[in-house]
Image (cartoon, rainbow, N blue to C red):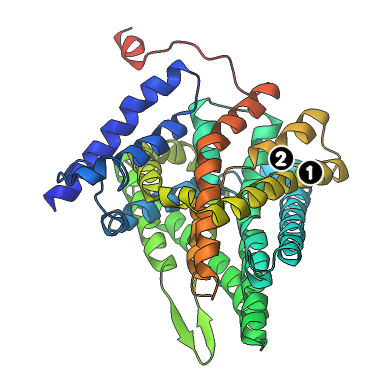
Amino acid sequence: METYLICLAVSMVGGLMLSRLTKLIHLPAVTAYLVAGLLLGPFCLGLLNIPGLGYSNAEQVEGMRIVTQTALGFIAFTIGNEFRMTQLKKMGTGAIIIGVLQAVITTVAVDAVLIGLHFCFPDLISIPAAIILGAIASATAPAATLMVVRQYKADGPLTKLLMLVVAIDDAVGLLLFSVSFGIASALSNSQISVIGVAVEPLLEVVLSLGLGAVMGWLLNYVERFFHSRSKRLTISVAFVLLTVGLSMLKFQIGQVHISFSLLLVCMMTGTVFCNICDTSEELMNRVDGWTMPLNILFFVISGAELDLTVIAQPMVLLVGVVYVIARSLGKYYGAFTSCRLSGQNKLITDNLGITLLPQAGVALGMAMTASLMPDGAMIRNVVLFAVLLYELIGPTLTKHALLRAGEIKPEGRTSARKINEK
């Protein structure tokens, strides 16, 4: 236990100290946290096997999963706060069109390129693996996007649309992956399961939204019994923790496997709560402040999870490079096309696709599910390679896109210490 506590402390301090260095070269703090994770991971300082100084093996990193899942729950809860009715009335239809269409275009683009690669080099990648990678390509990392928006206090039409699209993207990505996984499994096993392809994916989305709605309503009901800010903050944190725990439940009814999406459940909880609670905005701001250390741990541990051995595998590198290029083009032109169709202005049309490039936890979760397939190792390694690239450069690209759109103010030297002295 003491080793884990020391690891958590070293992770936070290491991430914060490295963020001071990245600030000098104008990189987002998210990049610093991820690099700190790589340095503390099993391939760098972890090799020294000094208890508490880094993560010496993958099992130790996996032991921190409860921290990353909890952080992801709070991140999703915060993103759900963006779905206020006032916002949806302004850009709801456009956000839905863009969120759905860009994800589908990305999946189709990656599928087409990787299936073409299969016909050119049949031994390099199978059709089932290509189909699954296409679906995984649709996923965007909400955590990295949210952290960049928070750090630079980005605000404007592009930022507001981006937060809505990222949330919709996760729901669409989940459906695309579930259907693609069912089709790929059918091709591998020569039999199609209607339950696996159609019923279970739809049921997961519906049940996740339903559970999230119930938890959001309950939070609003229970929160009314408390009046002090500290107690209302405590009950909010407790409900998010409860929601994260419930979303991890899995069971089976007959031949149907029942599970929930942590992201969808927590997003829906935040959405319902912010729309029915009159004081939700003030409370959400307090929750955001409380979760900052948790978010730092999320990215540092995510960096430690990255497997650097994939760089030494030529086949993985080749497929990975093709995947990254195809996905990047799919995201950019998918967002560009859908923005044009929904009548967005030029600044949004030109920059939204770039902000959708980061990819991390959701994609890795999908890859872990796909690891049970015959080509599961290839899928997992390709996604790991892509995540390594996207997480290191994606936040910086998001920052520059928001800068071009004029939604990030020029950085200045502000100090909370000096402000508090006034």
**Tag 1: amino acid:** Tyr
Q: Is residue 161 left or right of residue 49?
A: right
Are the residues flagged by discs 1 and 2 in contact, CB closer than 8 Å?
yes
Q: Is residue 374 left or right of residue 87?
A: left
Whole-percent x and y of residue 228?
31, 40
Q: Which residue is mark 1?
A: 333
**Residue 131 in view:** yes
**Residue at position x 28%, y 59% from top?**
59
Please say if 384 is above or below 188.
Answer: above
Quadrant placement of the C terminus: top left
Mark before the other along the chain sequence, 1 or 2: 1
Q: Which residue is mark 2?
A: 353
**Circle 2 residues within 10 Å: few <14, some 14–19, many ≥20:** many
Tell me the SS state at disc 1: helix
**Residue at position x 68%, y 42% from top?**
86
Tell me the SS state at disc 2: helix
The residues bearing labels 1 and 2 have C-alpha atoms spaced at a distance of: 7 Å
Residue closer to the observer: 379 or 204 = 379
